[in-house]
Structure formats: C-alpha cells, structure tokens
Amino acid sequence: MTYEFVIRNGTIVDGLGGEPFVGDVAVSDGVITAVSRADDPAVSRADDPAIGTGAKEIDATGLLVTPGFVDLHTHYDGQAIWSDRMTPSSAHGVTTAVMGNCGVGFAPCRAEDHDVLVDVMAGVEDIPGVVMVDGLPWTWETFPQYLDALDARQRDIDVAAFLPHSPLRVYVMGQRGADREPATAEDLALMRKLASEAIEAGALGFASSRLATHRTDGGEKIPSFNAAEEEILEIARGVADAGGGLLQFVPDIPAGGFQPVLQQVFDAAGEAGLPVTFTLLVLNGGDPLWPEAITMVEKANAAGGDITAQVFPRPIGLMIGLQLTANPFVLFPSYQEIAHLPLAERVAQMRKPEVRERILADKPGPGLVNPLVHLAQMWEWVFPLGDDANYEPDRSMSILKRAEARGVSPMEEAYDRLLDDDGHAILLGAMANFQDNSLDTVGELIRRDDVVLGLGDGGAHYGMICDSSFPTYMLAHWTRDRAKGRLTIAEAIRELTSAPARVAGLADRGRIAVGYKADLNVIDHAGVKLHKPTIVHDLPAGGRRLDQTAEGYVLTIVSGEIISENGEPTAARPGKLIRGRQPAPAGA
C-alpha cells in the first residue's frame, strides 16, 4: 500500500503515557492510517516493513514522533482573524489552540459596542487598541457570524473558541452589562438562548473571569467580574441545552480562600451536567492556598463532577524591559519625559549620571496603568533573563539579592540591568508558581490526573508576557535539564497532548493511533533549545509584540501537511476552525 507519507524509524510517543517505541507512522487524507513497531517479531524491518511505501518518506531515526500539542488558553481571538500564523504557539509544536478564554473576546458585539470590547481587550490582554481597530474588520455581530469569519480564514494550525462572558453580557444588556449591573430575568433568558445558539454553531463551551486584575484599559473591572451565580447557571443551562461544552473560569486570587468563587461555578456546572476547567495559581509566598482548591476538585469529582485545575508549568512570567509595557520606572514623570524616544536615544539619556539620579529619585505619578505593571518592583521575584532563558533561577540571581551583593538599592540594580545589551535586556518577573523559589510544587500538580496544562496566552499580553513557549520548556527543562523531579518523555507528552484534548472534548486528536488526526511533531529531543524572547513589529498598524523561537522541532504537521521544517514555516495553511467537541475515531 502507498501512503501520502511515512515517518520511519522514529521513537513514537503515543500521547497516552505509554512507553515510547521505535516504529513507523503512515499518514493519508489528514489522518494516521498505520502505525508499526520495530520490536514486533512478525516484522522484518529490512526486508518486509510493516508499513508500505510513502509518496514522501521521512527518516526520523533518533528523533521523537509525538502528537501535536494542544494549548487550552491562547487568546488568539484577534490574531486568528488578522494573521494566518498563530505564532509563537505554532513554533512550539502546538497544532490546536483554544481561544475566547477569560470570558473576553470580540463576539457577540453590536457596532456601537466595538469600543467597549476593544477597551476590555486592551486592558485585560494588553493588546493596543490601534492594533484591534486596524486588524479587525468587524464583519460579524453574532457569535455564529464570528465563527464563520474564523472559518473563512486560512491559518497554520487549528483553532477552537469559547463563547466569552463579557461580550455576551454587553450584547444582551448594553451599558448595564458593561457597568456590571445585575441581570434581569429577561436578560438571563436571552443569555441562555444565545449560549445555546453559540454551542450549536460550534463554540467549544463558555468562558468567564472573576480576576480582579482583569480590568479595562480605562481601569474598570470587566463586565463579568461580579456576575451572580444565577447568571452563570442560566448560561450553563444554555450550553447544556445545545448538547454541552466546557466551562472555563478564572477565579480571583483569594484573600479568604477559593471556596466562595469556585463553588458557584462548580455548583452551576454540576446542575447543568458540564465539565469545568479553571486557572490555578501557586502563590510564591505565604500560606499555600492551592491545596484548598485541589480539595474542592477532589470532592466535586468524587460526587460525579468533571473538573480540572489548569496549571502553568513554569513561573507565570511578567516580561520587564525598556521596550515593553512594564518597567519599574514607567510611571515616573522623569522617565515619561524620555519614554517617547527611540530606544538608542533613550538608553543614551539613561546612561547620563544626572538623568539616572533624577529617575532613581522620582516617584510614580498619577495615571491609569495595567495592574500587572506594579509587579515590576517585586524585587525578590525579578530576575535577569539571559540568552539561556532560565525560568527556574536561583534565589541569588534576583534583583534583590544582586543589589544586596553590590551594596546598592534594588531600583539601582534594576536600572543598570535594563541598560544591558544596549537596552534590549529583559527581566523576568516570576509573579506566581515559584513557591520558595522552586517549581517543585508545580511539578507535583502536573502529575495529578485532575490537573491539566494551560495558560500559554500566545495571542495576548503582547508587551508583557511570552508564555506560549511552555511546550518547549516542558521538553527541555522538565524532561531533560532539571536536576530533580524530572518528568519522563511519555509523561510530558501526555500532558501536552491527550490530557488537554480530553479536557477540551477533542477526542479526535492527541494520540498516535490509527484513525486519529495527523497532527504530529518530529523532535530532536537532545537539540531542543528555548531562545530568549525578542520583540517583533508584525501586528496590524505596526504594533509590537514579544516573540519566542526554539530549536529542535524538525517537523510540525497539521492534518497531514508540514507547516514547519527545522523551525522555518512552510507555505502550508491546513488549520481549520474546530466546531464544537469532536468524537473519537470509529473503533478507537
């Protein structure tokens, strides 16, 4: 038999956690059509291979062959409209990206409310308003129409979308929704109806947020922030009316515990019979709060629920730099006097002793700013991010400890480090997931069946965060370079493939087995390397964003087409809109 292509002699990692084995994978018509093992005694590899020839033969000797990776939290709502490449994610082996996260997005939306949603996305996700104004054609009003716009766009990888809460609320309630007023019975009935229509059209589920730092560009809390439990329940019922879907939720970081906020969502999901995934942070210091959330998950699942906590596998990292949204001086009037200058001129000014003295002696002025900016001065958790992109740095490398060693203030040390590399230096603000300066707790959580990886945020926080490279970090740090508590290759690949695919309800991918979607990575594990983030200007209106590339991805394949070869994108654009949950292949 002749196949479209055959990957020969690779070390196949099946995605389910099974022991890797050497074998062949054949692909035709966008699906995996045959898999063989070299250790099968019935197969004579030299004279009688188990798999026939391929129109294209790929030698993967010494390389890993894995399913394509699934990222459950990407915010590509805008980028999937204005771009045909979902980078950085697709440069890190991701072949399926889920968006509409945190309950923010661009549909449903009436023309008169475009500015409201732009204000929400600019504030919550650090996407400049001009980028959205120039990049979005707004050819839709309803959520089904937005899905049609996604469906009409060619792109490199598959995308799926949640119905986002904040646009839904504003669409139904107008300014009352934006002002977070309580929904009336009529409002709730319409939300339920529109949620059902969205699921029927192909929404993967429904997403919402209660995170206090999620604010509009004008500094207001987002429309969904204090929505009542009754509102969540009615929308969940609408999802269930149309056959079901996943509820995605971002709770606030609680002062008094997770119980009140999470329980509302768990109860609504339980009544509607829906699964839930929610973002879980591990605080760096103080009494751990995550055990309470995990206990709640265990209790809910023991009672018949389907709940997973979503955890990021490295510190949730604020990128701090002179070219980025956040730096320690961004609110200082003395810095604002030169902030408009091109980088080289600004650096020249900042190196002048009198300018340095004036900025360091200054105080923040008034003005609205993204709440995350204030984290740029948490000196114990801020570290220079060198070319090796070390996301688990030693405590001695913090700005605080480096300042103490030099006998200067942390502000002085940060000032000097930001001028390194002619002002191109980037500092890592480890905002969370770095308990006791270690990822040990994160490692414990990753290994749990009720925890799934997420929070790549590839299409958001363009000037503040560059976390969509986490699959490469899993491969390099967690399975190879970490001194202790390493994951096996099989464990890491399961967490990047079949585990998130199961949570999303995408049962047609995440495995290497006959009948499954031919989304694949061919990886040189020994050569995997994560580069330092860089700044590119490829957004609409010339907007800037952080990008991050990697080495080691020999091939990335989507629906049987090679979209990247040795880190270089091809012309193939096989990515599709995934409409709703997908069944497993027949007989699987």
Image: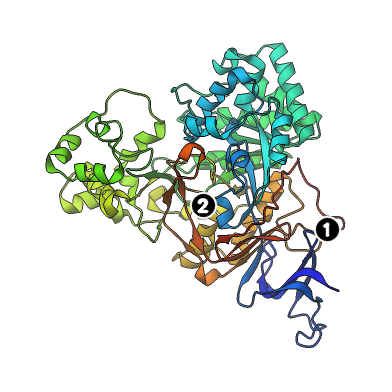
Secondary structure beneath label 1: loop
Left or right of 102? Residue 216 is left
Q: Position of residue 235 (x, y in %)?
A: 71, 25
Left or right of 455? Residue 155 is right
Number of marks: 2
**Residue 348 visible, this angle:** yes
Looking at the image, residue 202 lies above or below residue 210? below
Looking at the image, residue 490 lies above or below residue 320? below
* Most distant residue in the bottom direction: 47
Label 1 Cα crowd, 10 Å radius (few <14 / some 14-19 / many 20+): few
In front here: 385 or 375?
Answer: 385
In the rendered view of the protein, which quadrant contains the N terminus? bottom right
Dividing the picture into quarters, in which one does residue 113 lie?
top right
**Residue 228 visible, this angle:** no
Of pointers 2 and 1, the one earlier in the residue sequence: 2
Q: What type is the residue that disc 2 sits on?
A: Pro
In the rendered view of the protein, which quadrant contains the C terminus? bottom right
Secondary structure beneath label 2: loop
Looking at the image, residue 483 lies above or below residue 232? below
| Identity of the residue drawn at 78% across and 80% down | 40
Q: Where is residue 308 in the image (x, y as percent from the top left)?
A: 64, 43
Q: What type is the residue that disc 1 sits on?
A: Ala
| Identity of the residue drawn at 72% across and 47% down | 576
Q: Position of residue 252 (x, y in %)?
A: 51, 31
In front here: 492 or 67?
Answer: 67
The span from disc 2 to disc 1 (Cα, nearest Å) is 30 Å
| Identity of the residue drawn at 81% across and 84% down | 48
Left or right of 295? Residue 186 is right
Residue located beneath label 1 in the image: 588
Residue located beneath label 2 in the image: 313
Label 2 Cα crowd, 10 Å radius (few <14 / some 14-19 / many 20+): many
In front here: 168 or 82?
Answer: 82
